[in-house]
Image (cartoon, coloured by chain):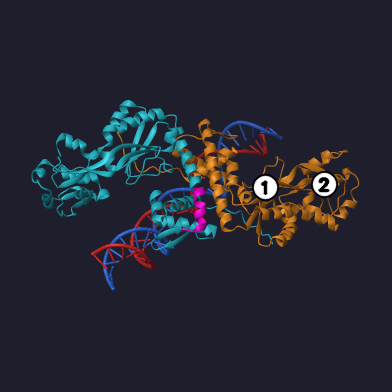
Chain colours: A orange, B cyan, C blue, D red
Amino acid sequence: MPVSPPRPKGPHLNALRAFEAAARLGSFSAAAEELSVTPGAITQHIKTLEAWAETPLFVRSARGVALTPMAEALVPAFTRAFDQLGLAVHALRKQVAPNKIKLATLPSLAQYWLPARLGKLRQIASDLQVSVIALEEPPNLVREPIDISLFFTSDPLGPNDIEVLQDRIFPICTPDVAARLTRLEDLRNETLLRDSTWSDDWEHWLSAQTDLGGIASGGTEHSLFAVALEEARHGGGVLMAHEALVQRFLDSGELVRPFEGIVDLPRKLVLHLSPEMVRSDQLAQINEVLVEIAK
Amino acid sequence: MPVSPPRPKGPHLNALRAFEAAARLGSFSAAAEELSVTPGAITQHIKTLEAWAETPLFVRSARGVALTPMAEALVPAFTRAFDQLGLAVHALRKQVAPNKIKLATLPSLAQYWLPARLGKLRQIASDLQVSVIALEEPPNLVREPIDISLFFTSDPLGPNDIEVLQDRIFPICTPDVAARLTRLEDLRNETLLRDSTWSDDWEHWLSAQTDLGGIASGGTEHSLFAVALEEARHGGGVLMAHEALVQRFLDSGELVRPFEGIVDLPRKLVLHLSPEMVRSDQLAQINEVLVEIAK
DNA sequence: CGATAAGATTGAGTTTTTCTACACCAAAAT
DNA sequence: ATTTTGGTGTAGAAAAACTCAATCTTATCG
């Protein structure tokens, strides 16, 4: 017979968001990354949602998770909903402060490439307030309150993307150290400096050199490019550098290229614009700015 | 110069939901009602959202709140987003348990009108599990996990609505009490029973009677129709009854109508279907059920 | 004019949710 | 066999959300 239960509550919004992220990214840890929480938090959100729905949504295996066929069918609707919500939040931010712009980029770019461009930019559009957020991974521009991202990628360009430059690497060191280096084999006696986010740059570069000696792949790895660069500047070794980041040290002569070889990596530095950024009628002004940033 | 602030966080989802509800309903207390929280909770949500956005969203006056012109423009996007989310949740519920159906209705209807219909319904579609939720106010079928609502309304019917019957009122009492009543004026000596949700039914009915004596508008008011009815059944007075709710007592003779007058109120009992209910391919089966419910 | 009512706010205190930290586990990769 | 990867479980802590009761402001009523 008909019971009269208490008013049923919907699922928690945060649990739905966690579900959507995990489903879209195919992984709890990736979802945790995107939402900037620990993986354990995602596990718990999914569990409460599964408890609410009284059904499992993911099948767990030791190697990762996969969506239940049933859950699979539901994901697009949730993705659409949270995308809409993201757009609405973007619209709110823009409405409130049309000329505050948040730009996310790699710490190294933020430190060595951006400042000069932003300086010029402030002369052109002094009403814009650009703040820079240093991130290791590109943010989701639909979901997060960020307007522009600037990262290296090898993905094909979308309509809201602007190519800035080609990623290009070569070794650099102080003139002192360079004096000791005549052949590639001499690198065996030097400390090879590398950045942990691009830890196989040395391998890429070496394998592109015609006369390849078995140069050790070791060397000291630094979690920040800035630290590795600092060590190179003090003559602590040979750094595998990205052109965009070290141009000014080459110009000043503080650092030099001990070898000719330059390797183009299969990726470009790309500016991504948030949908609201594109939609906004402010676009003309922004574009002027972007052209300047992209030099 | 470009700072590097910590990763910016988006606004709280619950605050956005509160904002959307308050904006759509034009009132914090109405939003509180819809979300089943206290008005204070809404106030706080809006405040945190305003703090996040660094701008006021509502202008407060003692009479209520009104949206900032700026906020006004943003509401539709949020409404769309939360509607989408509501639909997605409905889809989830249906996917998980296609034949669990939640029906919300007035306590009095749940007690006096529904049971007989649901009984018949279970014979026709025994695989359906209908659970009944008693509510004073119609729920928002897009946002809440409820499939069908059954309430009195004077609004024009939408596409997902089915008219069930016309609301019709008249006084009833026990035969004993009726024996004392020959003219309307005799009501002055009786206790007029009324339900607090329909507290002006007596006035409606009286003003529709041709020979209107100045019958006192007092009497005892009960918060539940069931209580008022119980009192009438014990000869405690004359109850202004709704036809749908007391038919069975008239049939059994336990209660009688001391006067002829029947007043049609300008509202109908209407079944509302959730969008998912309509969308579902289960609709054929449901319809069979609905026809039965609507008798 | 005072009384009352409607609606929102406030601050304190409480409950619930959400998160982290860290130990742990199982398959896959080395 | 060891390491790595990705998820789970639990305890405790932090943050968020909520309630309650008092309070304020203005409109309406008598």
Give the left or right position of residue A106, taking residue B190 as reference: right
Badge 2 density bin: few <14, some 14–19, many ≥20, Cα 10 Å: many
N-terminal of the pair, mark 2 or mark 1, is 2
Look at the numbered discs 2 and 1 and tell me whether their residues touch, using CB distance below 8 Å: no
Query: Same chain for marks 2 and 1?
Result: yes
Q: Is residue A234 visible?
A: no
Give the left or right position of residue A39, taking residue A208 as reference: left
Q: Nearer the viewer, residue B143 or B72?
A: B72
Q: Nearer the viewer, residue A154 or A134?
A: A154
Residue shown at the point (71%, 55%) measured from the top left: A288
Q: Nearer the viewer, residue A156 or B215?
A: B215
Q: Chain of mark 2?
A: A
Residue shown at the point (11%, 43%) measured from the top left: B178
Residue A8 position, x and y percent, is 39, 42
Amino acid residing under circle 1: His
- Residue receiving disc 1: A272
Q: In this picture, which residue range is highlighted in magenta? A: B67-78
Which label number is shown at residue A170?
Answer: 2
Badge 1 density bin: few <14, some 14–19, many ≥20, Cα 10 Å: many
| B123 shown above or below A176 | above
Q: Chain of mark 1?
A: A
Please identify the dominant SS of the magenta region.
Answer: helix
Which label number is shown at residue A246?
Answer: none
| A169 shown above or below D26 | above
Q: Nearer the viewer, residue B162 or A40?
A: B162
Residue shown at the point (56%, 58%) measured from the top left: A96
| A203 shown above or below A232 | above
Q: Is residue A96 visible?
A: yes
Q: Nearer the viewer, mark 2 or mark 1?
A: 1
| A25 shown above or below D26 | above
Amino acid residing under circle 2: Phe
